[in-house]
Structures are given as C-alpha cells and as structure tokens.
Image (tube, coloured by chain):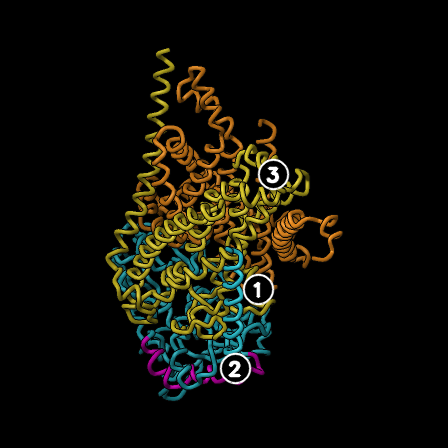
Chain colours: A yellow, B orange, C cyan
Amino acid sequence: MKKIELQNRLATILILSLAALAALIAGGLVGYLLASGLPHVSWQFLTGSTKSFASGGGIFDQLFNSFYLVVLTLLVAVPLALLAAIYLSEYAKQGPVTTGLRLAIEVLSSLPSIVIGLFGYLIFVLQWRLDFSLLAGAMALTILNLPLLTRACEDALRQVPQLQRQAGLGLGMPKWRVTTKLVLPAALPGIITGAVLSAGRIFGEAAALIYTAGQSTIAVDYANWNPFAPTSFLNPLRPAETLAVHIWKVNTEGLVPDAAAVSSGAAAVLIITILIFNLAARGLGKLLARWLSR
Amino acid sequence: MKNWSNRLTGPSPESRCEAHGRWITRLALVVIAALVLSIIGFLLCRGSRLFLTGEGTLSAFLLGTNWDPGHQAFGAAPMIVTSLFVTLLAGLLALPLALAVALATTEILPRGAKRFLQPGIELLVGIPSVVYGLVGLTILVPLTRKLLGGTGFGLLTGAGVLFLMVMPTMTSMAIDALEAVPNQLRRASAGLGATRWQTIHRVVLPTARGGILTALIFGMARAFGEALAVQMVIGNAAVMPHGLGSSAATLTSVLTTGMGNTIMNTPENDALWSLALVLLLMSFLFNLATRLVSRKKG
Amino acid sequence: MRNKFFLVLGVALVALLGLGAWQAHGTTKVTKVTNVGSTALQPLVEAAVPGFLKHHPSIHVTVQGGGSGTGLSQVAAGAVDLGSADVFAEQKAGIDASKLTDHIVAVSGIVPVVNPKLGVTNLTSKQLRQIFTGEVTNWKQVGGPDEAITVINRASGSGTRLAFEQLVLKGQSPIKAQEQDSNGTVKQIVANTPGAISYIALPYLDKTVAALKLNGVAATKANITTNRWPLWSYEHVYTRKQASPAARAFVAYLQSPAVQRHLVEAAHYVSVDSMTVRRDANNQLTRVKGGE
C-alpha cells in the first residue's frame, strides 16, 4: 500500500513540476516579449502611420488590417468548417470516403504556409483577378485554418453526449432541429476555442499573406464607410499589410533606423491585441450560447 | 389557404428544413473537398514537372545528397532527413510537457486553472513565427553555442524553436483529449480504490490515447510546415547533418528562401515545387501510419 | 419576432451595400498599376508612391515584394505591370529579356560585414575570395584574432549573391554555407554571431555590424560612383515592351529628379545620374563622361 502511495505522490510531483516548467518557459517567453516591446509602445506608435526611411513610424494601419482580416477570414472559414463538421459528425456514414476526406484535410495542415500563399497567389490573385487584396488573403488563410477548425468543430460536436440527441429525437424533433437547437449550443465552447485558436494563427501568419494580401498598405480613408469605394478602409479588395507581415518586413528588409524597436513594439502590441480579442470572443461566445439555446 | 392536399401530404416544413440542412452541410463539405483536392492536384502537377521535363530523376532527387539547383544538382535527401529529424525531436520534447500541463489541469489542479491556461495558450499560438525566430536567435543560439560549441546554429536550435512553437497547440489538443474521457470511468476507478496516478496511468491515458496521438500529429504537422522561424536558427545550409550541432536546412526553409529568387517554370523553380510535393507526401504517409498504429492497439 | 427583426436588418444592410456600390461606381475610374519583385528595392519604390499620387491622382500604384525571380516571371508573363529586380533579366535563365524593357532606378553598393567585436576592418580581394571559397577558415589567417570564420552566404539566385560571386569569387564556387535571403536577417545573424561574415546592400548598413574596407577602400557613395568600390549592382524596374501609359508614367517618375535627388539619397542608394561608369549585363564597364 505504501509503495503505491509513494508512487502516486512521486508521479503527481513529477507532473506538476513538468507543468510548472512548461508554464515557466511560456511565461518567460511572453514576459520577455512584453518587456522588450512595451517600452517602445506609445500613443503615437499606436495611431501613427508607417515611415519609409525615418524613425518614429507607427502601426495603426497594420493593426486595423490584422483585425479586419481576422474578421473576414473567420466569416468565411467558421461557417464552412462548422457545416462540414456537422455533416461529418451527424450525417456521414463511416466509410472509405469520409476517412479519405478526413485524411486529406489533415494532410493539408502540414503544408507550409508559403505553399498555400503561392497557391493563393496563382489562383486567387492572378487567375481570379482579385489582385493583392484582403479577400485573397482571407481565402488563403481560410485554407490554412480549415484543418484545425474542422477538426475542432467535429470534436466539439462529438463530445456532446449521445443522450441529449436521443432525448431530442425521442420528442419527435427532426435531426436538423436537434443539431441546431441542442447539439450546437452544447458544442459552442469547443467551437469557439477552435475559432479563437484560428484567430491567433491568423494574427500571427505572415508567409501566406506576403503573396496574397500583400505587404504594402495604400493610403486609406477611415471616414469612408462604403466598402465598394477603392480607398475605403472597409474595401475588401484593397491590398493590406497586417501586423505580423509588418514585423516580418521590418525585420527582413526594413530601412528604418529604429527597425528593432518597431518590431519588438509591434510584437508586444500583437500579444496584447490577441489577449483582448480572445477575451472578447469568449464573452461573445457565452452570449451566443444563451441566445442559441433559447 | 389553398393547396390543402399538398400541405397535408407533401413534406412538412420540418422535413423541408431537414433536407435543406443536410444539403447545405454536404455542400460545405464538397467545397472543402474541392479546395483540398485542387491544392493536392496543383502540387502534384507542379511538383512532378521536374521529372516530366527530364531535368531530374526521381531517384536522384530522393537519394541524392547534393543540392545545388543553379548547377542542375537536385538531391533533396539532406533536407528530407533534416525535416524529419527536427520535427521528431521537437515533437518528442514537447509531448511530455504538453501532456504534463494537460494532466495537471484536468486531473490534479482545481477547475479554475484552465480558465487561466486557455488564454495563455491562445496567446502563444498567435505570436508570429518571425518573433519566435528572433527569440531563438537572441536566446537559443547563444545558449546552444555554450552547450555544444560551434556556431550555435543547427539541428538542436531548430528543434528548440519548433518545440516552443508547437507546445501550445499540442497542450490545447491534449487537454481536449483528456476531457473527452468520461468522468464515470474516473469515478469507477476511484471507487475501486485506485490512487490518482493509477487512474491516470491505467484508465485516463489509455482511453485518451487516440486523442493524444492526434495532438502529437497536429503539433508535428505544424512543426513540419514551419519555415520562417526555423530558417533563422537552423543554419540554413543544404548539407547532410552529422550531429546535433551541425547546420542543416529543412524542406520548408529551402523552399521559402528559394521561391522568390527563381523564375517560374525553370528547373530551379520546379525543384522547389517538388520539395513541396515531398512535404505533402511525407505528411500523408506519416498521418496514415499513425492512424494504423492507433487503430491496431485501440 | 426575432426572425422579423433579422429580416429587416438584412434588407437594410443589402440596401445600404447596393447604394454604396452604385455610388462607388459613379466616381472616377482609377487605373491600377502593380509592382512585384525585389524586396530590397520595395521600400524605395513604395516611398515614391505618395509623391506620384499628387501628380496622377487617378493612378493607384501597389508595390509588393516577392523576390526578383517572382518580379521577372510575373512581368514577363504579363501578370503585373512592373517587375523590380536586382539582376539584369539577361542574367536569369528562363526569361526572354528581349520582351522586356529595362529601367534602372538606382545603384546599390554591396558591402562585406563582420561581427563588430571581431576587430577586422580591412581585407584584400584575395582574402575575401579565400574566405568565401573556404580556403581560409580562421580569422588569424587573415590577420585577425584566433576565431573560426562563420560564413553566411546569400540565397542562391538572389541578385546580391550573383553580383558578389561575379565581382569577388571570379568564377570559383563558394563553400556550402548558411544561406539567408534578406538583408535584415543577415544583419541580425552577423550581429549575434562571433566570427561571422556576410555581405549586405549598402542602404541596410547600420551600427549593429562592422563594414569592411576592401583593399583599403571604404564603401562610400563617392567611391561607388567612380567604381573605386567595385561591389555594386543596379536596381532595375522592368516593364514589357508595350507597357501601359500608367506604368510608363510611374517609371518616368521614378527616374525623375524628384525621386533621384531626394528619395534615393534619403534611402542611401546611389543615384544613376551621378555614376561615372556604366556596366552592362556581361559585366563590361564603360566610362560615362563626367557623370553629373
């Protein structure tokens, strides 16, 4: 008995210390990035626009573009992945076709983002004549995030107990009703986790966007709310440089003297942005869950 | 109200709704399938050009060790070996830590711990790879230089950066896998007098093995496809690695470095697409293998 | 109740969007000009856009990177209007240079850099060649401290590497070494690695790395204009032979004094007008009278 107790205690200590090590590494990383970046963040940095050769440029356009691109991408990717996941988990019969499809989607997840970017460039930008644009970027990012999103949605749906479905079906509800009214609200937290993780990846993605959304920003008019006007900030057909692309560009071919400061400041801003975005998404998810199950 | 007969004998609004739902979900799946297949087809088409134009042979490409596309030498073996090795190393480094964090949050710590952990994980996923590369360059490279000597650029540093990058994804998925284990099992095990470790070891882990393997695959898949960060710290030299500290290049880093500098439809460019195809095929085989393994035992 | 609310909302949104589309359609037509190519040249071209927009408000220029190879491929294929490159199109296999028109917009010096703690300030051409071909592997063999040399080469196929190999290695092949694509990354690696040597474009030089003199000559603008500093290359913008008027207007603006005098200077490139020598695709030098 004693040996087992000892074993239990040792194992617990081992697990906890390994977890603490992981937390320490991750915390150290975030702390390091914040500590080296935050001193460069100022109001002027957040609201100014980029400079080509002089120091003191800001990141406002890039910050907005990142947000807008996340929204656009999730608008396309989440419904697509969710619907496909519903089919896979609720309707599809297990067979070689569904297995093959799942395999294909998972294989897609290990493609380097530059390959997706070049695919997007050759197909969306050139073939479909979308030019370097937010829309082309959003479509490339959709491809990039489909594996993870579909997987997350399917897992979330599957984790809803079978009993809940049977209860609904037993009351005479059609399957689609059961899925949208019972299963979906119950699976929502998992789906949101998937979407938020994808949003993080979109915030941080650079390679896929260099060839699709582009790496330069045209001067946009933040007072023009008409998404069809060429200079409107809402126009999805304008080229847009996101914050991650900006960090990449400043680091690789930046001619500004304060490149290191801009890059670390932008990284710190990005971290805080993601944090705020995720908390907001969670809050929104809770509201949505309440609304759906009404 | 007209058409009573139709309303009584035709499909009810509910069943019409049902049909629409089924149709729309299937459509989404078809769209995804079309996208995936077109990418795979696109890569197959681009990646096989090198061999179809007769500029290179498949065996020389897969087995050759000299990569010098400017001089018609397309030996991709060094990159294939490096990619595999670095990915495996990163995955094996990250798995114990990811699993430990997952076990600690689901089995040991109070439920509130997860509420703090989740935003943290999502934060780490969103850090751009360039930033990971810079951290690797300023912290990991000097550290490796002290540990192994040499330049500090190499396999170990590359694996270290990848380890940092994939740990959050793996942790998040491992947590999901552990949470999918029904609580009845835990209670039954505890009811039989098992200690926490015995429950974890004998009940929870075996039940969640499929999910944990998936976490490993997804993490390694991301490591496999990562380019910008690795390129900065691995030394990016297309030679066969001969030790943990030796410079090397992965498939993705060579691909990323070369893509912008080559002219489309020249052998140099085709060779890069062939690398992308290799990447696709390898992850395909890898996925298939793990699937078989988890099915056989599970 | 809820459904009705959303129906009204949806109809209102569609109506608004329609109105916007109609309104945008009525405004003056803009011409789009896209530039793809050399990432090193991108900041300069991008900086010229606002000034150009003042003269030609109806022409919207988009400047993207992607690399010299992409730039040349895409302009030759007709996918974009302008392709910037830091090599002559003739030097790239697979490009039909006769279909393209070359517009040289700037001259960029190439400068060998080392880790600042090394203390080496000058190398001869021969020593530099020996380092990059692997004949010399320790700094003490060229008069420096006892420190192993870490060679960081540039991506094969890049314009900077091509120019460096032609001008320094003179046909010998370099050792297999670390390859990096961008000036910024090279700078960071050289700054962080003891005993590292590489080469970057002159505009990117800063205090984090130490520039080397070559045979006692420093890489300055004055020395580049007279070819006393021989390591330099052109920055090209290519168009097709039948380029659109909008694309031609932008190229003309890039070559105009407004850009050449001010922006090129501010970016630490050398203006084409001030060069007293000219170099062609086969590396033949000819003297131009007086320069400017």
Residue A121 position, x and y percent, is 55, 63
Residue A134 sits inside the magenta stretch: no
Q: Residues within 10 Å of mark 1 (few under 14, many from 20)?
A: many
- Residue under pointer 3: B288
- In this orientation, does residue C254 appear? yes
Name the amino acid, label 1: Phe
In terms of secondary structure, what is the magenta stretch mainly? helix
Secondary element under disc 1, as helix, strand or loop, is helix
Q: Is residue A70 left or right of residue A131?
A: left
Disc 1 to disc 2, how far (Cα)? Answer: 27 Å
Disc 2 to disc 3, how far (Cα)? Answer: 56 Å
Q: Which mark is residue A225?
A: none
Pointers 1 and 3 within a single chain: no
* Mark 2 vs 3: CB contact within 8 A: no
Question: In the image, which is nearer the foreground, mark 2 or mark 3?
Answer: 2
Pointers 1 and 2 within a single chain: no
The quadrant of the rendering that contains the N terminus of chain A is top left
- Residue under pointer 1: A124
- Residue under pointer 2: C26
Looking at the rendering, the stretch of residues picked out in magenta corresponds to C240-266
Q: Chain of mark 3?
A: B
Vertical order, C275 against C72 (above or below): below
